[in-house]
């Protein structure tokens, strides 16, 4: 086993904890941001598709059908 000649003090523990905490917060923040962007894109596409389908259906109901016959 390795024997450390130096005493580990409170400052050493706090410094290492802050270093680990900043790494975790940065990683989690990036993941949350990417998930939020993906969820926003899916929501936007869903809303646009719904609006298109509703508009198309409404347009079919309102349009007049003209039938031309040859005499």
Image (tube, helix red, strand yellow):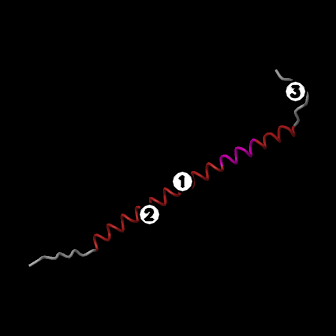
Could you tell which of marks 1 and 2 lies nearer the N-terminus?
Answer: 1
Q: Name the spot of residue 37 as percent of width and height, x first.
A: 56, 55
Where residue 57 sits, quadrant-wise, is: bottom left
Residue plotted at (44% across, 63% down) = 48
Residue plotted at (36% across, 63% down) = 53
Q: Which residue is mark 3?
A: 4
Could you tell which of marks 3 and 1 lies nearer the N-terminus?
Answer: 3
Residue stretch rendered in magenta on the structure: 20-28
Alpha carbon distance from label 3 to label 1: 48 Å
Q: Extreme left residue here?
A: 71
Asked if marks 1 and 2 touch (Cβ < 8 Å), the reply is no
Quadrant including the N terminus: top right
Q: Which residue is mark 2?
A: 48
Residue plotted at (49% across, 58% down) = 43
Q: Which secondary structure class fits the magenta region best?
A: helix
Q: Which residue is mark 1?
A: 38
């Amino acid at each position: 086993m390795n024997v450390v000649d130096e005493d580990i003090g409170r400052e050493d523990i706090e410094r290492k904890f802050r270093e680990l905490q900043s790494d975790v917060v940065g990683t989690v923040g990036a993941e949350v941001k990417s998930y939020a962007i993906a969820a926003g894109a899916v929501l936007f596409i869903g809303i646009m598709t719904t609006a298109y389908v509703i508009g198309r259906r409404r347009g079919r109901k309102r349009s007049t059908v003209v039938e031309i016959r040859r005499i």
